[in-house]
Amino acid sequence: MDYKNLVAKRISEFVELDVETIEKLLEIPPKPEMGDYAFPCFQLAKSMRKAPNMIAEELKGKINKDGFEKIENLGPYLNFFMDKSSFGKGIIELILNKKETYGESNMGEGKTVCVEYSSPNIAKPFHVGHLFSTAIGNALYAIMKSQGYNTVGINHLGDWGTQFGKLISAYKRWADEEALEKEPIKELLRIYVKFHDEAEKDPSLEDEGRMYFKKLEDGDKEAVVLWNRFKELSLKEFDNVYDMLNVKFDSLAGEGFYNDKMEAVVKEIDDKGLLVDSNGAKVVMLEEYNMPPCIVLKSDGASIYATRDLTAAKYRKDTYNFDKSIYVVGKDQKLHFNQVFKTLELMGHDWAKDCHHVSFGLVRFADKKLSTRKGDVILLEDLLNEAISKTRDTINEKNPNLENKEEVAKKVGIGAIVFTYLKNSRERDMVFNWDEMLSFDGETGPYVQYTYARGNSILNKAGEVNGEADYSKLTSKEEFELVKTLEGFNKSIVMAIDKLEPSIVTRYVIDVAKAFNKFYNNHSVINVEDEGLKKARLNMIEATCQVIKNALNLIGIETVEKM
Ligand code: ARG
């Protein structure tokens, strides 16, 4: 039952505010002794021409108290105390009934959302920033899907641009086939860097690079074959990471996919009279909106990053007819997206307002050893493997006899990284600190996972308990807090969607784990004599585990039964 809503409905019968407004006014009292919800009566003083504390007293006498333990007035506040026994029963049974679907709704039914995330660059390392995008996008995708949205996951691979002409030129000059097969991205990076070094000495190399890109754009067979090869080799490496993270996409349409679709869009911009010549380049002027011009064609006639984004945005609208199209990309690209969205708007596409840049902060390293020297990159795969190996060490220390240690180390280790990425509001810079993120205490992935495993082990130890659960006995503060937290799952999901902020779900699951541990530290379960109470507590634990599992799954983390 939604108690907040019930409180608001009961109040609304006697005042001139609607349920929604009342819900917004409701407060959580600072102390549990003061009730579960408080309604401040100040708002009504004017219309009712009475002092707020008199209104509170009057309402207390009138309101229907069914479903509440009591209702009290305290000064200008009207405090509601929920009936704890019926509350626990309702929520726990609901969760045990719905199982993995608890938390879902059909609020998004009939609506399509494009979610673009990850989008690494071909022939370049998959770096820690791309993991940020991958983790946020993957979570938003699952979170929205859980509410019935039709979600389209897109990996907008960076696989187009003049740099690929340079890469072809570099490949033909210096590539080492053996190295390319073994460590493709490393080798591609090596020859790309070499190209730049050599081009400083011999500028004609730049022309050669441009020439190859032109060939690629024109569909020259050799150039296309090489480009495809770079792409395949890179994707193979990226796929290792995606497999480890269990991340999937519905579309891999990268920048190159739009090569043959850009001309029409450039023409459309021109037809609308927006295209202006600027030193040979074609641009859309945006000074009226306090932005530098959006470059559409460079002076050599080549398309650029923005051209492909304009084309991709249109393609997505035409193909998926989205209600919302989101781009999970670092905040350093804020201006770029503002320019692209504004240009779409000027082109007359009113759906430009449905495009959102979901930005995130930088990744910093607390550990000096990890901070990169110039030109030195941290490969994500190494980072994930490191997390696994460190977690394996902890397990060997804490629980050396654990079966399937490898699987546990993998899920918990990788989960720890993902959890850290999704713990704080995304715009905040994230600090990469091994000790902190892998700790079993504190607000970490392993802590939540450990709580889940602990709950499971209690359930296993208890075995079958005869008789009916007596939920009316779950009356302690800790039990009530836990059940109340479990009730809030869907609300946290809806809020996460509203703010496009997965950390709301992450914080939620931390709250569940904390509430559970508080309960477990204060009350026994296995040794309880009263079978009805014991069964009720066990059911509450089972419900808690279910909610932790569902919530972690939404943010892309798998649980383990033992650890
Ligand atoms: N490949 C780009 C990068 O690594 C990110 C792409 C972002 N998405 C977009 N539609 N522009 O910086």
Image (spheres, rainbow, N blue to C red):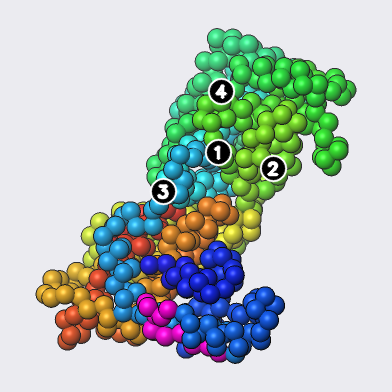
Q: Nearer the viewer, mark 3 or mark 4?
A: 3
Q: Nearer the viewer, mark 3 or mark 2?
A: 3
The residue range painted magenta reads 64-74
Q: Which residue is mark 1?
A: 323
Determine which quarter of the picture holds residue 447: bottom left
The response on whether ligand 1 sits within 8 Å of label 2 is yes
Q: Nearer the viewer, mark 1 or mark 2?
A: 1
Determine which quarter of the picture holds residue 464: bottom left
Q: Is residue 488 left or right of residue 214?
A: left
Residue type at numbered disc 4: Phe
Determine which quarter of the picture holds residue 551: bottom left
**Residue 333: x and y, percent?**
69, 42
Asked if residue 367 is positioned above or below residue 144 in the image, the reply reads: below
Asked if residue 135 is positioned above or below residue 126 in the image, the reply reads: below
The secondary structure type at the circle numbered 4 is helix
**Which numbered disc covers residue 106?**
3
Residue type at numbered disc 2: Gln
Which badge, 1 or 3, is on the more N-terminal residue?
A: 3
Residue type at numbered disc 1: Asp
Q: Which residue is mark 2?
A: 333
Q: Which residue is mark 4?
A: 257
> Tag 4: Cα neighbours inside 10 Å, few (<14), some, or many (≥20)?
some
The secondary structure type at the circle numbered 3 is loop
Q: Residue furthest right?
A: 279
> Tag 2: Cα neighbours inside 10 Å, few (<14), some, or many (≥20)?
few
